[in-house]
Image (cartoon, helix red, strand yellow):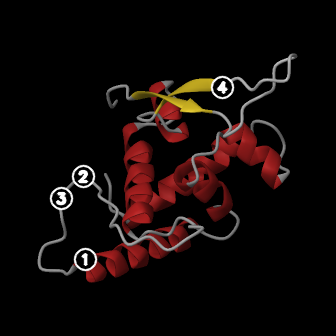
Amino acid sequence: MRQRELVTRELTSEGPRRRDGTKRRQSVTVNLAESSLTWLHAHGHLDDRLHDAGERLRCDYERAQLAPNITMRWDPVRVKGRPDTGLSPTERQVAARQRFHGAIGAAGKGLEDILWRVVCAGETVPAAEKALEWPARSGKLVLKLALDRVADFYRIT
């Protein structure tokens, strides 16, 4: 498991108002190193193979720069790890996009929703279940099935 990376973030730009009408800032401490996937792994709900498959998928998602943006960004996403040798930055991005879509396709219809929500968007399993209108405690099982197929796609043993 990765080391804790605690940061303090302001909850809103304006913050809640006090009774006297002045604004007060409200903040929360977040661990940037812990994702929903890491939490499931740390609590024994996912084995190493499934966790590694999810991390590979998330890494390809970030390398391909598929996250939505509200404005154009020119800075490249920096992902630590082994660089793809012999490829330009654009070719690496295209290759990551192809791997990501291949892995999502390997998961199969109906499984890509929970896979994307938990692994890429960082939602918790209960939040993803609620958004997908699934029964409670069904998401973990479906996520495991999806991650197993993704692990097969990435050839993780």
Q: Which image quarter: residue 77?
A: bottom left
Quadrant placement of the N terminus: top left
> Would residue 12 be found to the left or right of residue 152 on screen?
right
Sequence-wise, which precedes: disc 4 or disc 1?
4
Q: Nearer the viewer, residue 137 or 76?
A: 76
Residue identified by numbered label 4 = 25
Q: Are marks 2 and 1 in contact (CB under 8 Å)?
A: no
Residue at figure coordinates x 37%, y 56% from the top left = 56
Residue identified by numbered label 3 = 82
| Nearest to viewer (mark 2 / mark 4) | 4
Q: Amino acid at mark 1?
A: Pro
> Would residue 138 be found to the left or right of residue 149 on screen?
right
Residue identified by numbered label 2 = 80
Cα separation between marks 3 and 1:
14 Å
| Nearest to viewer (mark 2 / mark 3) | 2
Residue 148 x %, y %: 49, 54
Seen from this angle, which residue lies furthest left?
86
Cα separation between marks 3 and 4:
41 Å
Residue identified by numbered label 1 = 89
Q: Amino acid at mark 2?
A: Lys
| Nearest to viewer (mark 3 / mark 4) | 4
Residue at figure coordinates x 61%, y 69% from the top left = 108
Sequence-wise, which precedes: disc 2 or disc 4?
4
Residue at figure coordinates x 37%, y 47% from the top left = 52
Cα separation between marks 4 and 1:
40 Å
Label 1 environment density (alpha carbons within 10 Å; few <14, some 14–19, many ≥20): few
Residue 35 x %, y %: 50, 38
Residue 33 x %, y %: 41, 35
